Amino acid sequence: MENPLLSVRNLTLDIPVGGGILHAVRGIDFDLKRGETLCIVGESGSGKSLTSLALMGLLGKTIKRSADEMTFDGIDLTRANARTMRSLRGARMAMIFQEPMTSLNPAYTIGDQLTEALLLHKSVGKDAARARAIELLEKVGITAAASRLSQYPHQLSGGLRQRVMIAMALMCEPELIIADEPTTALDVTIQAQILRLLYDLGREMNMAMILITHDLGVVARVADKVAVMYAGELVETGSATEVFNTPSHPYTRGLLRCIPLPGKTERGSTLGTIPGIVPSLIGDVAGCAFRTRCPHATLACRGDIPRHITGGHAFRCIHADGKRHAEEATA
Amino acid sequence: MTTAPAPILELRGVTKTYRVKQGLFGTPRPLTAVNDVSISLPRGEVLGLVGESGCGKSTLAKILLGLESPTAGQVLVEGQEIGAQDRMTLARRIQPIFQDPYSSLNPRKSIFDIVSLPLRVHRIGDAASWDKEVRKILDIVGLPARVMNTFPSQMSGGQRQRVAIARALIMKPEIVICDEPTSALDVSVQSQILNLLGDLRREFGLTYLFISHDLAVVEHLATRVAVMYLGRIVEEAEVGGLFDHARHPYTQALLKSVLTPEPGLGVPDTQLGMAYPNPIDPPSGCHFHPRCPKATAFCKATAPRALPTPLGHVECHLHDPQGPMFIGKEG
Amino acid sequence: MTMTDIPDPLLKDIIGPTPAQMLRKRVFGHQGLLIGASVVGLLLLVAIFAPLLAPHDPYAQSLMTRMQPPVFLGGDWEHPLGTDHLGRDYLSRLIYGARVSLMIGVIAALISGVIGTAMGVAAGYFGGRVDMVVTFLINVRLAMPVVLVALAVVAILGGSLQVVIMVLGFLLWDRFAVVMRASTLQVRGREYVAAARAIGASTPRVILSEIMPNIANNLIVVVTLEMAHAILLEAALSFLGLGVQPPTPSWGLMVSEGKNMMLFEPWMVLIPGAVLFVLVLAINLMGDGLRDVTAPENRS
């Protein structure tokens, strides 16, 4: 068995707010091997973006992070000091954000920004860095790469900027890429191209990738592993086929019923919904957080919730099958 | 089917050209955001308008709302040209629902003020009847009457979008322009709003222009679909026809890039070149030719004409029986 | 089965506070704002109730009791802050001086506020030619040195309270115009403005009811800053003898009158100077505080 590149056990993020402590992330576990793609899917406020920032050590000072284990290739991230984190970031783990314009510096050329990380982390000369930048820009599908180096971010379209961001993340050949909604701001055709690119590059360079998104379509198409996040917890994890073909947590099934499937959902029919709203995570949160919106909730949902594991597929629910069979019988 | 009644909304050759200044001393150059668009929409139908950002779909919406006036062409509501109509009359017949419910509601106004604004602007009824009307419409969009005294910041995204819908419907318009009404919402909320829009249309016989980049959503809600590229409607058809037999290569690429939550299918290759052209410098001939996988030298030189199809039209040389490519393509 | 009686803790109502409640909470959590506002409020009360508070007539001269020191320098309680070179009670003149300072501050800020806001909002909302003209006027105004222009105008028209107010009112509108133009540009793009226009709301209605409430917070901040600015300029003009004319009690004038005695009786300069300093500092604290407590709402 190959050791996982990234191991996270019981990651918890607490944010002090006006009315008490906001339990934004409540004890999540996952492993990621080299070359694997994990998609964390959830709605706004589920804590998925905070999780990615926690891994990169980019959380604000007010957020309290704790974990039983958080290791990257044997390096204990919970104890890593600022210097270790800096040497990891950009060099061995890189991040791609949703809005490339906010993470590219408008005052520097594309070339400066692309080569910066490489010059900082690796002992290469300027010419070599430039050559690598051109190579990567071509790899991410940017034409006339050499002339792009002297351009500024505002001179590029959104799709091109996102490609530059990806090239930048790849400059030092990182082992882990964390992409937070990398295609949400882009048009559908560009989204498909960027996702394809990320997917192919991940395979080619044997990179591990964490993709954070709210889009179930994206998840189904690129994920090896899927983690469904709700109110700070991973309610269901497993391979993409397991999670999408036998969705076991009522929340996962609810989400899948909300989106129309071309060719399958009858046009104009009523779509499934999840009634209610995400509960407040301020103060003590016990039991299953989805019980306030779940059609199968009982009083027992306020207590401890067992985790059902079948091979690589796991979910948290008091019902042994998450009431999947009952729903399928009535459907 | 052929003897359709007079369309409730009709666009004839609508064109909008802006003059854009490039740089400090540059001479203004024309940017044609909407280029000779003709659509006719029968009462009770939902026209889905799809296209990438910058294709002119939002400009078209603004023209229909009377927020911009077309440079050329006519907009007719039930046969009457709206340029000549009073703006107030137009407002009673066409109302918008915008994309971002965080930006479309004035944060300083209570929900009652926001929803009753149309009645107050049009001096319909008095304070007592406003209260009654607001309660009624809030009930219709599924909000409790007690929200009347709350402010937008106290509501969730889905609730805000319901408020925006209430404001649009309180004067009982006939046409509603929905500009990406669900793309800022979470998946579970999106389906609630789509269901609501569908119910309202059936109940009040509304006609929608539904602008969206999400083709799955468009297929679900629309009865007709128009595909826009660089200011032109390149294909228009009844929804089934368009989704089952897309004719234009751009429509085909758009359909291909829809990511349905079906694992194992991978990310599709749209075969589109990357760059969306600069609308100030539209490509010669068929505007789509630089990205079109099937383009020939003829497409580069000559703009295609609008060809009638069953229940719609398409602008592509590939389907022109008198075009030079017809023999090679269909024969 | 007793659990059925206990409401689910996760179902608690999470309806947030109203904007007014949030504002109140932030105001009362902001020390600088509270301190600044209390000092300004106190001085405002002093100005309003000057006739009741002043122990003496600020104009009454008494050559027998000139240059009496304040109590803390050995004077008596008849004149707690001493008397000036004409024997007028210093505390009473200080109290009446608050009227002049605040009146000039408030009225000048109002006049320039109306001018600058009208120009800035018009430029931001209509854009195009209007914006070009307003931007040009702002640049012209910024190219004029305020103090020199004020000096020149006052020198020609003669100094008086009214002239000083008008001059400052017509000179200090630039910051209003700049800030209001930028704020309007920002708010104009919001979809609620488009929604109001699509409803058929008239332009004045859109500006007054949709745009103004959302830029009012910035306006209030500029009002405070310009109030402080006007008060300081009045003091400077009066100090130079071109502002408020004697015998009207003005803090700037008091500093000016005391400067001849500065080496022998430094308190004659220090007392009005300190009061001026405290008032301007308090107004600025209030302005900064207002910006802090009103800004967060714009974020979401």
Image (cartoon, rainbow, N blue to C red):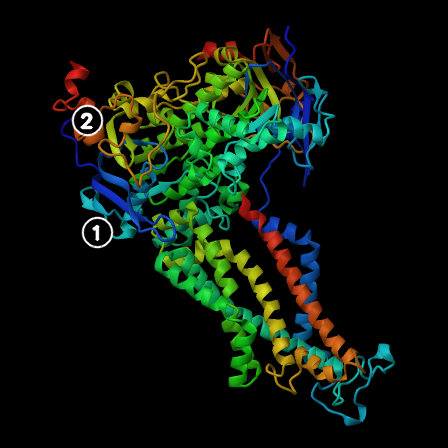
The image quadrant where one finds the C terminus of chain B is top left
From the viewer's perspective, tell me whether residue B263 is left or right of residue B303: right
How many numbered marks are there?
2
Which of marks 2 and 1 precedes in the sequence? 1
Q: Amino acid at mark 2?
A: Phe
**Percent coordinates x, y for residue C172 in the rendering:** 53, 69
Q: Which mark is residue C157?
A: none
Q: Position of residue B232 (x, y in %)?
A: 25, 35
Q: Is residue B224 above or below residue C288?
A: above
Chain containing the residue with disc 1: B
Left or right: A217, with B303 as reference point: right
Contact flag, marks 1 and 2 (Cβ < 8 Å)? no
Along the horizontal axis of the image, is B236 left or right of C118? left
Q: Which residue is mark 1?
A: B84
Q: Is residue C101 above or below residue C284?
A: below
At 62% across and 10% down in the image, what residue appears?
A: A308
Check the image and name the residue furthest to the left: B322
Q: Which residue is mark 2?
A: B298
